């Protein structure tokens, strides 16, 4: 760990120095009280407020730095990494900016789009880096406007590296990070929270800091603590956050040293040089070193947060955080679904159940909604769902390549029964007849949810017989909100669910099902629709049916999941299209396999069932059993 | 029963005759779908739609006619009668219009204000009569505009009686009910549903009907059925409703005959004349006659609804309806509180619990609200509550006169303990030491609610010791919505409550209570405030706490009652003021009794407690017990 660059985040205090630190303001334009129940204060605070609150409460935090990936595949992997590392509870992540890589473009690998994905689809508080040298004011303003439009709220303002070897000041141009900070404040007032970088041991190019270079051999934390005290002495009161670079390998360390023009302390060189060919040994040493350094920083009482340069890798940083006891993998969720961090969506507290396994698709298709009316579902017929055109958007793509999908879903289908078999293997987790496990389906990119495991036995039975389930939840009658499987929201509450089952099935089974449902008319709500939109339902007046809700101390009732008849017809299009786009197209045109999937797409119905009587035993399995009996 | 006047209500069908019947229109401007859960279709339908729906389903209905009272006391009684007779389930009530009595004024006894009270405060679908002869267009338009502003949606358009003996047509004036109907449609488009009157045996003044007079001796229902057929034959398709006048006394019958210029059939005269001095016998005969006539009308299959001329009396009409099996005293409620029938309030589905015993006061104080934001509470700080000035509004007045209140609450108070005694007697239902039962309190105009009876024993205990309770509810963990005591909403649902307790108490008890509440910090939410507004609470961020909610098949969750910190401060003003306005002012100024109440008003605190853990046994009694223990 040799990088001594420090992050300074503009806070609401009155730090007014013009140097590297940015100015802040007490009054936040964005602070009008929200009228929906606030289950999660973090969702409504600015980054500076989150830091301030943790500083006041003494709670330590960490953040994670990533760079934009080079390829679309690497982007898909990085986004999975966001989801996994997001689970450890970083206060924010940041995405670096590389002027040479078209960082503000719409490419799926640009800094802008990666940050957009982190905020909107992964729900992470995100800081976007931005450099200013060799750029026009218009360029910069364009980038900032775009960032704002995408829901980004935090900018790390940097000077950037000169283009050639020599540094030349431009008249009227951006020469220092401070110029960028001033520009952001001029053009966007207090909208953005601004972070800036500082070098506790002096910036290698800063002449006036030359004398400080002799401190390079001092222990880094000593330098940092002195730096903090010096900052405070001259009136910088905003949070100052040390950046931690866990040494992960000999070459990446050399690369960093070269780029940053910093030197590695001799003590560290002495350890590393002899083991330079042993990657594991170097990483272990790096973790060890980072843990002890972080401990000293935290124990000083002056440091409240740690910023990690991950180099887009998980293992070392996660290991350091776990050993520090800062990795907070909390199985509890603020809501049953993953919330987005876009400011526009912070009042969103209800979603249709249909997209439960495709939350990124739901966010994508509702991204143009101006309004989440009081976070409440209400009438969904006015806001239109986005068009179903971009199956190829990289963050909606299946993570598995075609060959793997064929192994899972069958190189060659012999009839509808081969399809039943695929669904059944996905449910049971058993390998298919060619020995491959089915770990994803067109409607579910991940293995079965823990909660769905509760229903495994029943699900297996019905899938085997052609009730092809794609979504389900058990009924829950008042479990504590801290329940490790079905709990969500703050502690001290109770959560409830109505049993839900959604599946594709043949028209023959639907005919029998409808006869059976007559017996359950007052208890079970159903929606049955085919690809052409022929729709059979007993739902009253297109009203949404709340199927997940929670009761919490001192709060209004939260009902985050509904079965909504209007959005179901939008979901229907997507659900049917996935048969073709994700499955049928794996096979040659006109091939028997493709025609089987096409037949199912054209002839099957999509069915959803809700058992309204949540305190009683779930009757939906009985409904299905009765249907099979009627068919026999 | 001799009155053959018939009501014809404009329906959405295309009845286009210009005579007595009014025109309707298919397109309702008011039909935009509401975004809140519709628990009760009736709340969102126009009168014509309600009639149509019942006609389609074959459900028989009745309506009740009242006239405006002559004195303020009579108005208070009439409003109580609205509440009692409203419980029988009339489809609507109507209020007659007497040009001589200033019917459109703001007097508490005017037709306009009585109809306003029926709609807004008693939640009754209401038809306001309006006559047009001898009035200018501007007068009429003014009345109609006022009616619309007050939330009235239905007008019974009448010609009215001529001023002198002779009838003179006015050029350009209103000469027939049809002129009024046309005027209403011209000026207000389709806003109002319009009813008109018809005479099945011919109007006594209508020359062209003279020949019909010979039918007078036929049985009235035969006349009515013929009238209906004749109407249908000439294309009148809107609902036609027979008006029923149960004979209630010899003199009221004579009076009616004189006014209506109708004759009593000889068969009826033959029965009545010999018993004309026996009121009970005449009323029994009248009930008998009305029941048999109504049965024949209903059995004909052509009549779907019956309209009753009550003469502002309850017994005869109620008796007829009960014997017909049409009196539907349904203990189930659409919501836990009585809903208002003002169209503006039809989306209202949540109220603060504080006004539970003073719903009319709540409606009055929120009557200027433009918005019940999606029927949802949300942030109550923006809409302002109405001023607390009109204690003397007749519908907010206590029903009991001063002498009675003194008997109940004490001619002479000897100390705070005499006040405790009054509260205790109200709870127990036992007479006070002077032998008088306490049937109302300044905060509760009615005896204890059935639901509160569940808590009686505990309430008695704490009131005796100076915890002066004014509002409470037990916790409920999922009882069927059809439960006769705590149920509400459509069947097939489940209702829930958090335990609630609200009381006045001394600062000494509050000090002990606050110590005790520390133990219950995570479980119990409290608000404690004195008359000066000194406020102690542990409620998070001024958010409302839902204390009553219901889960229904195919619906969103309904949470009709909240403890809302903002509205509590408005309620506080009203709750403290009632000590003075309703109680202290019964006594002479400077009298010891008055000073005792004044002392309590100045020094006590108003406290509310919510036990959030609704599935467990209510802990609020333990909180109070612990408090008393700490004091001992």
Image (cartoon, coloured by chain):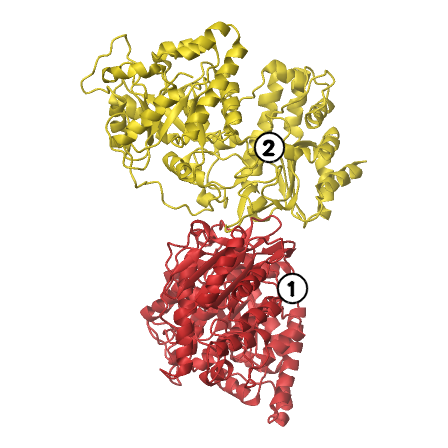
Chain colours: A yellow, B red
Residue B440 position in % (x across, y down): 52, 76
Residue A488 position in % (x across, y down): 56, 40
Would you place residue A22 above or below residue B531 in this image?
above
Would you place residue B383 above or below residue A495 in this image?
below
Would you place residue A469 above or below residue B132 in this image?
above
Looking at the image, which residue is at 49% across and 79% down? B418
Q: Which mark is residue B484?
A: 1
Residue named by callout 2: A532
Note whether residue B523 is visible: yes
Note whether residue B237 is visible: no
Q: Nearer the viewer, mark 1 or mark 2?
A: 1
Would you place residue B104 above or below residue B403 in this image?
above
Q: Nearer the viewer, residue B462 or A401?
A: B462
Please give left or right for residue A556 compared with residue B179 in the image: right
> What is the CA distance from the residue labelled 1 to the residue labelled 2?
46 Å
Report the residue that reaches farthest toward the left. Answer: A171
Residue B130 position in % (x across, y down): 42, 72
Q: Nearer the viewer, residue B278 or A505?
A: A505
Among the 4 quarters of the image, the one containing residue B329 = bottom right
Q: How many other residues sit within 10 Å of disc 2, few (<14), some (14-19) or many (≥20)?
A: few
The C terminus of chain A sits in image quarter: top right
Among the 4 quarters of the image, the one containing residue B88 = bottom right
Please give left or right for residue B40 compared with residue B322 in the image: left
């Amino acid at each position: 760990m040799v990088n001594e660059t420090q992050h300074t985040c503009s806070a609401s205090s009155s730090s007014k120095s013009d140097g590297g630190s940015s100015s802040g303001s007490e009054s936040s334009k964005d602070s009008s009280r929200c009228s929906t129940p606030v289950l999660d204060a973090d969702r409504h605070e600015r980054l500076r407020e989150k830091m301030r609150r943790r500083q006041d409460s003494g709670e330590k935090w960490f953040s994670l730095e990533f760079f934009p990936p080079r390829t679309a595949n690497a982007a898909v992997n990085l986004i999975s990494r966001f989801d996994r590392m997001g689970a450890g509870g970083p206060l924010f992540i940041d995405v670096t900016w590389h002027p040479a890589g078209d960082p503000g473009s719409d490419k799926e690998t640009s800094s802008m789009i990666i940050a957009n994905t982190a905020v909107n689809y992964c729900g992470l508080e995100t800081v976007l880096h931005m450099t200013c040298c060799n750029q026009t004011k218009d360029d910069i303003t364009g980038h900032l406007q775009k960032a704002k439009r995408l829901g980004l709220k935090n900018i790390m303002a940097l000077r950037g590296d000169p283009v050639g070897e020599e540094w030349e000041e431009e008249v009227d141009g951006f020469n220092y990070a401070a110029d960028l900070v001033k520009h952001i404040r001029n053009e966007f007032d207090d909208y953005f929270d601004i972070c800036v970088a500082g070098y506790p041991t002096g910036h290698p190019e800063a002449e006036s800091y030359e004398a400080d270079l002799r401190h390079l051999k001092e222990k880094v934390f000593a330098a940092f603590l002195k730096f903090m005290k010096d900052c405070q002495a001259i009136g910088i009161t905003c949070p100052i956050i040390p950046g931690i670079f866990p040494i992960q390998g000999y070459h990446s360390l050399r690369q960093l040293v070269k780029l940053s023009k910093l030197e590695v302390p001799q003590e560290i060189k002495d350890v590393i040089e002899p083991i330079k060919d042993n990657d594991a040994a170097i990483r272990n040493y790096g973790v060890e070193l980072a843990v002890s350094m972080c401990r000293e920083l935290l124990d000083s009482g002056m440091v409240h947060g740690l910023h990690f340069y991950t180099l887009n890798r998980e293992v070392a940083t996660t290991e350091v955080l776990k050993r520090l006891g800062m990795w907070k993998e909390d199985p509890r969720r603020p809501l049953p679904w993953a919330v987005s961090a876009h400011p526009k969506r912070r009042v969103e507290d209800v979603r249709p159940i249909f997209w439960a396994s495709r939350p990124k698709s739901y966010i994508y298709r509702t991204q143009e909604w101006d309004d989440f009316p009081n976070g409440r579902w209400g009438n969904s017929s006015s806001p239109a769902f986005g068009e179903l055109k971009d199956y190829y958007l990289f963050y909606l793509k299946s993570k598995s390549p075609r060959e793997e999908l064929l192994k899972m879903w069958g190189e060659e289908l012999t009839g509808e029964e081969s399809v039943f078999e695929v669904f059944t293997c996905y449910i049971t987790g058993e390998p298919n007849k060619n020995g491959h496990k089915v770990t994803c389906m067109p409607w579910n990119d991940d293995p079965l949810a823990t909660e769905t495991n509760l229903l495994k036995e029943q699900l297996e039975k019905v899938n085997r017989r052609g009730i092809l389930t794609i979504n389900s939840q058990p009924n829950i009658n008042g479990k504590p909100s801290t329940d490790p499987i079905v709990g969500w929201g703050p502690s001290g509450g109770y959560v409830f669910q109505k049993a839900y089952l959604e599946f594709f099935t043949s028209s023959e089974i639907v005919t029998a099902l409808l006869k059976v449902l007559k017996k359950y008319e007052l208890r079970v709500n159903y929606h049955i629709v085919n690809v052409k939109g022929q729709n059979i339902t007993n739902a009253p007046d297109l009203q949404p049916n709340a199927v997940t809700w929670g009761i919490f101390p001192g709060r209004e009732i939260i009902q985050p999941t509904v079965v909504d008849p209007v959005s179901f017809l939008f979901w229907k299009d997507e659900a049917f299209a996935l048969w073709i786009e994700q499955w049928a197209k794996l096979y040659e045109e006109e091939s028997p396999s493709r025609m089987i999937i096409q037949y199912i797409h054209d002839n099957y119905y999509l069915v959803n069932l809700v058992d309204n009587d949540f305190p009683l035993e779930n009757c939906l399995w009985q409904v299905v059993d009765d249907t099979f009996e009627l068919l026999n």
